[in-house]
Image (spheres, helix red, strand yellow):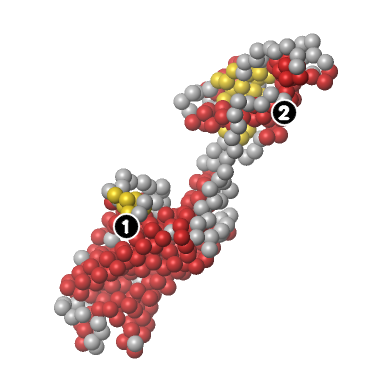
Amino acid sequence: MQRLSSVIKKSLKEQFRSFWLLVLTISTAPFFVIVYNLISESYAPVYDVVIINRDTEGNLSTADFRMGDSLVNFLLFKENRGWKISLAESMQEAEALLKSRKADLLVILPVNFSESISGMRLHQAGGEVVRDMILEFQGNLTDINYIIASILTYSHIQEYISARTGVKPLFGFIETPLGSSGQLSDFEMAVPGLLIFSIIMLMLTASVAMISEVENRTMIRLKLSKVHTLELMGGITLVQILIGFVSVAMTLALAAFLGFRFQGSFLPVFTVILLTTISIIAFSLFIAAFSKTVTQVLIIGNFPLFLFMFFTGSMFPMQASPWFNAGGYPISLISLMSPTHSVSALNKLLIMRAGWDGIVPELVSLGILCILYFAFGLWTYRKRHMGSRG
C-alpha cells in the first residue's frame, strides 16, 4: 500500500510536469461542446413557406368572407422557430424567392378556396353542394427542406379545413417521442457522445504517464524498489481516473450552462463513465508498450485516438453491419472499441431515459473489454519495458 501511495504521488507530480498536455486533455471536449453548440445554433433548420392568396369572396356571406385570409392568419399563429410563413403578391416575386433559396415552398390558394370550404361544410350538414379545390405546391422536389415544409404545411391546412368544415381526414396520427427525444435540441442530443469524447482524450495523458517512466529512466529505480507492474499501473490508473472525472465534470458543466438538461439517473451514468475511463486507460497500455518516448506516444497515439473519436459515435452517429447478435445486441468491428458501447449506454440513459436493465449489454461489453485491454496491455507493457518482472 505504501508503494502504491508513492506511485500515486509521483504520478501526480509527473502529470503536472506535462502541464499543457493535461490542459489539452481536459479542455478539448469542453471546446467541442462550444463548437457543437455554435453549429446547432447556426444550422438549426428553418423551413420558409411563401403563400400566394388568390381567394376571392365570391357569393359568400359575411361570415365566410375570405377564408384564405383566415387560413393565412391560422398558419401565422402556428409559426414557430423552425417554420416561417410569408406572403407574396405575384408569381414572379414568389419564384424569385424559391430560386434564390429564400423560400423552400410556395403554396397557392385557389380562387374558389372560400367557396369550396363552404361547400364542404354544407355537404357535411346534409346538403349536396361540394366544390373541388386544388392547392398548388411549388418548389424543388429534390430538396429535403421542400419535402419537410410540404408535410408541415399540408398538415396545418388539413387541420384548418377540418376545424372549419367538420370533414375529418381519412386517417390521423400522433407522434409519441421515445424518452426525451422529442424535447431535446440537436446540441443536447450530441452531449452524451461529447462526454465520452472527453474520456477518450485520456489516451494521451495516460500513455504519456506510462512512457515517461521509461524515457526518464525511472523504471530502473522502480524495479529496484520492487514495485510490481500492478502497483505501478494501479497508481497511474487512479490518477488518470481522477483526471477523467474532472474532464467529464467540466464538459457536463459547460453543456449545462449552454442549455443541456441532465435527465438520467446518476449511478448508472457514473458506472458507464467509470468503466469507459478504465477501458481507455487500459488501452493506453498498448500505445505506451510500443513507444519509447513521449514524442512517439504523440505520433503513434494519434491513430487510435482518431479511430476512437470518429468511429465510435462519440463525435458523429456511427453504425456498422453486425458480425452477429449476442442476446439481440449487435456485435461488429466497431464493437472492439469500448466508447461504442459507452455512447450507446449514455444515449439510452440521458435521452431514452432507460434504467439499469436497458444498458446491461453495454455494461457487459465494457466490462469484457476492460479485462481484455488490461490483460493484454499489461502483458505487453511488462514484456517491453519491465522485463519479466510481474
Q: Secondary structure at mark 1?
A: loop
Q: Is residue 278 left or right of residue 382?
A: right
Quadrant where the image shows the N terminus:
bottom left
Marks 1/2: CA–CA distance = 54 Å
**Residue in the image at 36% along x and 68% along y:** 278
Occupied quadrant, residue 65: top right
**Residue in the image at 32% along x and 51% along y:** 325
* Residue identifier under label 2: 163
| Residue 189 seen from this side | yes
- The kind of residue on which mark 2 rests is Ala
Q: Nearer the viewer, residue 271 or 207?
A: 271
171 w.r.t. 181: above or below: above
**Residue in the image at 23% along x and 75% along y:** 214
Position in image of residue 368 (x %, y %):
31, 64
Q: Nearer the viewer, mark 1 or mark 2?
A: 2
Q: Is residue 115 left or right of residue 377?
A: right
Q: How many marks?
A: 2
Occupied quadrant, residue 12: bottom left
* Residue identifier under label 1: 337
Position in image of residue 360 (x %, y %):
41, 60
- The kind of residue on which mark 1 rests is Met
Position in image of residue 172 (x %, y %):
60, 32
| Residue 31 seen from this side | no
Numbered mark located on residue 157 in the image = none
Q: Is residue 143 left or right of residue 9?
A: right
Occupied quadrant, residue 297: bottom left
Position in image of residue 275 (x %, y %):
39, 66
Which label's residue is closer to the chain start, 1 or 2?
Answer: 2
